[in-house]
Each structure stands twice: as C-alpha cells, then as structure tokens.
Image (cartoon, helix red, strand yellow):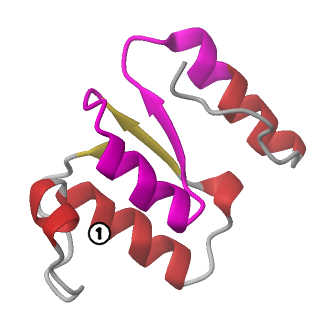
C-alpha cells in the first residue's frame, strides 16, 4: 500500500495523522479487520517520525520509496512468516 492513498475509506475516524496521510487509514482498517502485520507494508516517500510512530502502534511495517532491496527483504520475510527484527526505514 502506498501512502497517501487517494480515495481512502471515509468511514474511519479522521485523526491528524490520517488527515495528513490518508493511506494510514487504510492500513489501520486492514489491521482492524484481521490482516496480520506481515501482510501490510506502508510504502511511502514521507520520512515522518509521527507517521512512523503511528504505524508502529498498529504494527505495520514501513518502507521508504527508493529502497528496493529493503522492500524485497520485507516482502520475503512476510512470506516466510518471520517477524521483522529491525526498523525498515534504514
């Protein structure tokens, strides 16, 4: 999922972070309906500490655009079902 995602669900509560990054609402909704932390990856160009903190709260992995090897590693680890052991923003 890419943040911000145009056309995100309007049903979810509007918080300051979700107003700034509508894709966060999508990630939060997916976590709330049963998708695991390994199934959701926030892929964004925004290196924002407040977004990172909110994504950490919902246990969503966060990869900055332009880091294809890290994205590949996160996807691979998701398929083999291992929990991430490091921050993926590096």
Residue 3 picture quarter: top left
Q: Residue at x 21, y 62 (%)?
A: 17
Local crowd at mark 1 within 10 Å, few (<14), some, or many (≥20)? many
Residue 10 in the image: x percent, y percent? 13, 81
Start-end of magenta stretch? 45-72
Left or right for 20, reference 42: left
In this rendering, the answer to whether 82 lies above or below 59 is: above
Residue 25 picture quarter: bottom left
Magenta span includes 28: no
Q: Residue at x 80, y 37 (%)?
A: 85
Q: Of 88 and 71, which appears nearest the observer?
A: 88
Residue 88 in the image: x percent, y percent? 59, 29
Q: Which residue is mark 1?
A: 25
Q: Of 21 and 50, which appears nearest the observer?
A: 50
Q: Residue at x 68, y 66 (%)?
A: 36
Left or right for 81, reference 61: right
Q: Of 9 and 82, which appears nearest the observer?
A: 82
In this rendering, the answer to whether 18 lies above or below 15 is: above
Q: Residue at x 26, y 56 (%)?
A: 23
In this rendering, the answer to whether 77 lies above or below 51 is: above
Residue 6 in the image: x percent, y percent? 12, 54
Location of the C terminus by quadrant is top right
Residue 44 in the image: x percent, y percent? 32, 34
Q: Of 39 and 47, which appears nearest the observer?
A: 47
Residue 65 picture quarter: top left
Secondary structure at numbered mark 1: helix
Q: Count every numbered label the image shows and give the total.
A: 1
């Amino acid at each position: 999922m890419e943040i911000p995602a145009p056309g995100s669900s309007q049903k979810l509560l509007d918080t300051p972070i979700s107003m700034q990054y509508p894709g966060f609402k999508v990630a939060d909704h997916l976590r709330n309906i049963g998708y695991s932390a390994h199934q959701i990856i926030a892929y964004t160009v925004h290196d924002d500490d407040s977004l990172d903190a909110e994504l950490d709260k919902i246990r969503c992995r966060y990869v900055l655009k332009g880091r294809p090897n890290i994205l590949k590693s996160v996807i691979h680890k998701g398929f083999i079902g291992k929990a991430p052991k490091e921050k993926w923003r590096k």
